[in-house]
């Protein structure tokens, strides 16, 4: 009977060990896989994100040591002090406590907290109180339900959903300083590889900064529940080389492309309710409720990341936004097929 | 009934625990204080942040008379309780009724002030931040005064029916605790709204 | 040792019709019956909240899933959170407190039995109101349903402009009403503990369960009320045109956050303290030793009660507070971990040198210790505000708090069920089913909540009804969801155990675990009057003194 119980206990422990091995392997594989690097907080490409990773390593080491020590003590106590059949009826020594031991395990945690706090306070100040250099690029991000508005006040640019910023080299740093506002409810700007998240709260301007060291496209999304389509309020940050960024700025500063082939579509745009919400610079449209469409074709996605920016998707979106992003605040425009085709063709010219 | 002797040790000679009515009322007062604290914090936070509309300095008049009424009612209820302990029922009834009168006067004063603010100055709860926080805080207090007054009236009715004597002294004390709390809250509200806020 | 003497002999038993029984239960003021009503109410909502969780996890099994619409999903996570906190955790813990506190202090009932009943029915009304929103939330414009603003209802999302119809009002009213019920119960517990202890039971001789529920009740008084105040303000905004949280009129969304979290953080300590209570009663009995360091356990509890009121803005590290505020809340959040961690060491010290019995209550307690340790450590990680700027509002946080709530609170509750079910019903729960319950739940729990940390580290925010493929979140979410099904099966095993054992379980007798607190001195189930003769005590373990007259605790205390 005892042997059967022992073998059941052993196999239970064996299965438990297998389970934890499986969990650890899956976790490790997921974290180490480079294709998962897109939004991995442990793959920083900017100073704020890197400072956080540095701090987190210290925290993980300290908490890891605490875990190993206490875990070992727990396992030891369960194994060593398990009640055996031979002990039945006898009570162990009734120990009430020990001031010395209790003092020790109060003082040690206090010391650990002091160390952790000092390291943390340093990082807090380094990231939050970093002064803004004169070479910084200033961008204002305004959160909307469920899209991002980006304004470059000194460059006279208004765009949406996809942010372009210059890479910031060590020799000539050009960090981007973001001012964060909201037009409606709370949102949060989170690009894990570039910085920690900061919220966009109405009537409460915030600011954050990032200085990406490598060109490329960085992904993220809104990280504060803001309503029905919070999940599809995605972010794309394109970190361009210095020349690439200048070229992008120049293109964005141009008014909308005037293509004679698209005048029919432009007429549809101007006479339907589109201009109530959208703006296209160089035309009568200057609505601010929806994204600026002047250079719609310079973006790789529509609907703030909800779909690829293809002609077919664009047509589907204009016909019925809810088909792609149910609950988005753009109503279905109820256009005829020919109007829809013309309008889509016009949109396609807005490079 | 019970077959065996009590196996438990000897009871201690003097085992006195606090009165549960007073402990419960203290608990209620603590909880209510927390609610009032939040409303006071909101009031302080929004001081000076109005985007429009009448400001406290323009429209508020310090209600000295009605404040004196309410705070004196704490004295009268205290002495009423003392009289009841000594079985001076006539004095108790008189002081109790004066307490109710003073509390009622205070509510009348609040009503009068609100009437003036609404009809002469156009200040309502939806006018601006001052309106919202003012009516909420003062209104919450007035609601507690009303509830207290209702309880006082019930005790008054029982007294007139001759059912309140020294045996009910403890319960009357518990109700007095509540009434003192309501007065103490008014001291805070008065300071925040009429002194700091202007 | 038996104290059958403590029962009035020859009591008459009268047969009742089912209507009379129902009436008796609906009008009861007996703390034991009310405790069971609270527990039954909570178990019902546990299943409801669990179904909501299953819906969430099925939708998140793979990227771009379309099992439910975003509108339904958003209602599901709002209702799941609100239900689990307010209509499962709070009631079940109040239920156990109601049942056990008078018994453990040698009293015949709570200080205010009618207030007790009133508080329970207020909570029940709150639960009903919240779920009525599915039917009644539409309001005039057909615009509402169950609330979908998250269980925090952040401003201005809860305002009329962003939350038309009545869905948010049902959320507000349900919690306001049950909040008042909670305050009533808290006042009752405090008055009972201070005023109804049996002779000889000084405060320093109370069982730790009583201490912990006492401190919890004090916290309820000052933590629930800020939420009530904020909800009254929200109603003023929504119905009287007020501007408390109206950002267009100069109001502040951040103020709502402060008020909510001044409630929200102490709330989670309110939930965990009774679970510490269960552990502090179960672990000593199954280690056959007294609790290690009783005075420090009490001091740590009171410490936690106070310090936990100063940490709330660690839920707000990303809202743009300045570096000094962020630093303050970082250190306060780390400091509160110290007394909490000390408790783990004290339980470890209790087991050390003991003779551990691995019955089901102890299995769940050991699970609690491991899991609460890990949860506390991920909490320390989140307390470092820069780390929280990445981890906050992501699945790392979701994993952390479920680790505390499921791995900590629920495991402790399961332990409490297995430990006190014999006292409540007179029957033992099946050890076999108990072990199946434990191991299945342990496996499901770890599959789900260990792996759930990883999508957070890989950038997955919370409260999203779907996610993009190619972020590395797909496989992890699938395994997480599979784990929830295993947990669901374990819960079914548990419910089966509760039901079957009621009729088929072995008779328990007064004291099946050879324990030391007063509830084990009376019959199982206890008589309506609890104690025929009010007991007197001379130490913290009165039954140990009776069972070991040659070496009583009273000699050493």
Image (cartoon, rainbow, N blue to C red):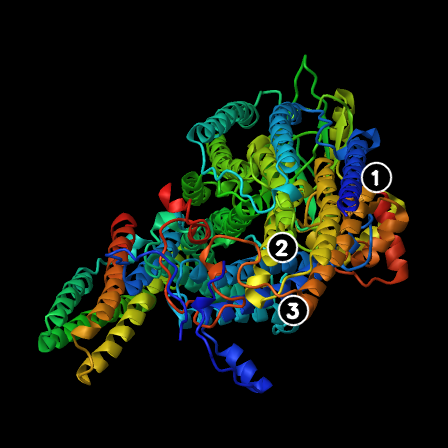
Q: Nearer the viewer, residue C213 or A149?
A: C213
Q: How many marks?
A: 3
Reading the image, the residue beneath label 3 is: C502
Does the CB distance between marks 3 and 1 fall below 8 Å? no
Q: Which chain hosts label 3? A: C
Q: Quadrant of residue B69?
A: bottom left
Reading the image, the residue beneath label 2 is: C414
* Labels 3 and 1 within one chain: yes
* B76 on left or right of A150: left
Q: Earlier in the sequence, mark 1 or mark 2?
A: 2
> Which label was assigned to residue C470?
1
Q: Quadrant of residue A141?
A: top right
Q: Residues within 10 Å of mark 2 (few under 14, many from 20)?
A: many
Q: Compared with residue C102, is residue C401 higher up or lower down, i.e. above or below?
A: above
- Circle 1 — which element? loop
Q: Nearer the viewer, residue C328 or B46?
A: C328
């Amino acid at each position: 009977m005892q042997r059967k119980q022992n073998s059941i206990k052993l196999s239970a422990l064996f299965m438990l060990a297998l389970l934890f091995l499986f969990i650890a392997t899956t976790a490790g594989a997921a974290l180490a896989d480079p294709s998962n690097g897109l939004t991995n907080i442990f793959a920083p490409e900017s100073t704020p994100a890197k400072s956080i990773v540095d701090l987190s390593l210290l925290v993980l080491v300290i908490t890891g040591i605490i875990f190993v020590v206490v875990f070992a003590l727990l396992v030891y106590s369960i194994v060593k002090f398990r009640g055996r059949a031979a002990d039945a009826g006898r009570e162990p020594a009734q120990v009430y406590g020990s001031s010395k031991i209790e003092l020790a395990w109060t003082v040690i945690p206090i010391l650990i907290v002091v160390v952790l706090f000092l390291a943390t306070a340093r990082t807090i100040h380094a990231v939050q109180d970093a002064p803004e250099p004169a070479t910084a690029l200033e961008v204002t991000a305004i959160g909307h339900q469920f899209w991002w508005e980006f304004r470059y006040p000194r460059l006279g640019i208004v765009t949406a959903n996809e942010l372009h910023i210059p890479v910031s080299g060590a020799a000539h740093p050009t960090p981007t300083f973001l001012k964060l506002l909201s037009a409606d409810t709370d949102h949060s700007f989170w690009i894990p590889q570039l910085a920690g998240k900061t919220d966009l709260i109405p009537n409460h301007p915030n600011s954050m900064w990032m200085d990406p060291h490598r060109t490329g496209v960085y992904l993220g999304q809104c990280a504060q529940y803001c309503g029905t389509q919070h999940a599809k309020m995605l972010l794309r940050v394109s970190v361009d080389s210095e020349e690439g960024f200048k070229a992008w700025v120049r293109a964005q500063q141009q008014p909308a492309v005037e293509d004679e082939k698209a005048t029919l579509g432009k007429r549809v745009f101007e006479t339907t309710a589109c201009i109530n919400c959208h703006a296209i610079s160089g035309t009568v449209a200057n609505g601010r409720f929806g994204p600026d469409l002047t250079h719609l074709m310079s973006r790789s996605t529509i609907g703030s990341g909800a779909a690829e920016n293809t002609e077919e998707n664009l047509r589907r979106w204009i016909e019925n936004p809810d088909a792609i992003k149910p609950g988005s605040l753009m109503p279905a425009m109820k256009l005829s097929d020919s109007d829809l085709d013309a309008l889509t063709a016009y949109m396609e010219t807005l490079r | 009934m019970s077959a065996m002797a009590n196996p438990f040790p000897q009871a201690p000679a003097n085992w006195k625990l606090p009165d549960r009515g007073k402990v419960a009322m203290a608990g209620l007062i603590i909880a209510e204080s927390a609610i009032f604290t939040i409303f006071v914090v909101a009031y302080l936070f929004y001081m000076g942040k109005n985007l429009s509309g009448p400001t406290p300095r323009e429209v508020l008049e310090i209600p000295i008379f009605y404040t004196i009424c309410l705070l004196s009612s704490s004295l009268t209820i205290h002495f009423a309780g003392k009289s009841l302990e000594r079985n001076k029922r006539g004095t108790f009834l008189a002081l109790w009724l004066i307490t109710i009168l003073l509390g009622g006067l205070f509510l009348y004063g609040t009503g009068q002030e609100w009437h003036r603010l609404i009809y002469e100055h156009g200040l309502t709860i939806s006018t601006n931040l001052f309106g919202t926080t003012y009516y909420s805080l003062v209104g919450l207090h007035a609601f507690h005064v009303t509830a207290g007054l209702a309880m006082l009236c019930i005790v008054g009715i029982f007294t007139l029916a001759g059912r309140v004597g020294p045996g009910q002294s403890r319960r009357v004390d518990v109700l007095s605790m509540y009434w003192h709390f309501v007065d103490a809250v008014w001291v805070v509200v008065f300071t925040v709204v009429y002194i700091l806020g202007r | 040792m038996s104290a059958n003497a403590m029962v009035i002999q020859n009591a008459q038993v009268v047969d009742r019709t089912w209507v009379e029984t129902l009436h008796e239960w609906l009008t009861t003021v007996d703390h034991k019956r009310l405790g069971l009503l609270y527990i039954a109410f909570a178990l019902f909502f546990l299943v409801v909240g669990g179904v909501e969780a299953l819906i969430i996890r099925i939708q998140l099994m793979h990227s771009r899933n379309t099992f439910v619409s975003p509108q339904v999903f958003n209602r599901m996570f709002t209702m799941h959170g609100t239900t689990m906190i307010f209509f499962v955790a709070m009631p079940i813990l109040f239920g156990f407190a109601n049942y056990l506190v008078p018994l453990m202090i040698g009293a015949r009932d709570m200080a205010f039995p009618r207030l007790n009943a009133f508080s329970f029915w207020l909570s029940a009304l709150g639960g009903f109101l919240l779920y009525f929103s599915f039917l009644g939330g539409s309001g005039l414009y057909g615009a509402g349903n169950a609330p979908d603003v998250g269980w925090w209802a952040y401003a201005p999302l809860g305002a009329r402009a962003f939350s038309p119809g009545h869905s948010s009002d049902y959320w507000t009213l349900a919690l306001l009403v049950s909040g008042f019920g909670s305050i009533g119960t808290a006042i009752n517990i405090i008055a009972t503990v201070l005023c109804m202890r049996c002779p000889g039971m000084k405060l320093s001789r109370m069982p730790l369960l009583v201490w912990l529920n006492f401190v919890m009740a004090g916290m309820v008084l000052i933590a629930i009320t800020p939420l009530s105040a904020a909800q009254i303000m929200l109603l003023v905004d929504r119905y009287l045109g007020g501007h408390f949280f109206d950002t267009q009129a100069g109001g502040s969304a951040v103020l709502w956050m402060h008020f909510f979290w001044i409630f929200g953080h102490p709330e989670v300590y309110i939930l965990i303290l009774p679970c510490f209570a269960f552990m502090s009663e179960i672990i000593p009995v199954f280690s056959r030793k007294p609790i290690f360091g009783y005075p420090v356990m009490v001091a740590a509890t009171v410490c936690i009660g106070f310090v936990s009121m100063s940490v709330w803005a660690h839920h707000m590290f990303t809202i743009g507070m300045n570096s000094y505020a962020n630093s303050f809340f970082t250190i306060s959040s780390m400091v509160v971990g110290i007394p909490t961690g000390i408790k783990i060491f004290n339980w470890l010290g209790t087991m050390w040198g003991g003779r551990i019995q691995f019955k089901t209550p102890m299995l769940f307690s050991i699970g609690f210790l491991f899991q609460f340790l890990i949860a506390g450590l991920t909490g320390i990680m989140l307390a470092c505000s820069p780390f929280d700027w990445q981890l906050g509002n992501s699945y790392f946080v979701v994993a952390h708090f479920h680790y505390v709530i499921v791995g900590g609170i629920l495991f402790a509750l399961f332990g409490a069920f297995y430990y006190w079910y014999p006292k409540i019903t007179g029957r033992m729960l099946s050890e076999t089913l108990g072990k199946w319950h434990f191991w299945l739940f342990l496996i499901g729990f770890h599959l789900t909540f260990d792996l759930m940390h990883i999508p957070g580290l890989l950038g997955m925010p919370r409260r999203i009804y779907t996610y993009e493929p190619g972020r590395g979140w797909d496989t992890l979410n699938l395994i997480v969801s599979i784990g929830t099904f295993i947990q669901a099966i374990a819960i079914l095993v548990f419910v089966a155990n509760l039901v079957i054992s009621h009729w088929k379980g072995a008779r328990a007798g007064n004291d099946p675990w050879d324990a030391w607190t007063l509830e084990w001195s009376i019959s199982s189930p206890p008589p309506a009057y609890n104690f025929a003769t009010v007991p007197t005590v001379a130490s913290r373990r009165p039954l140990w003194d009776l069972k070991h007259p040659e070496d009583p605790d009273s000699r050493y205390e």
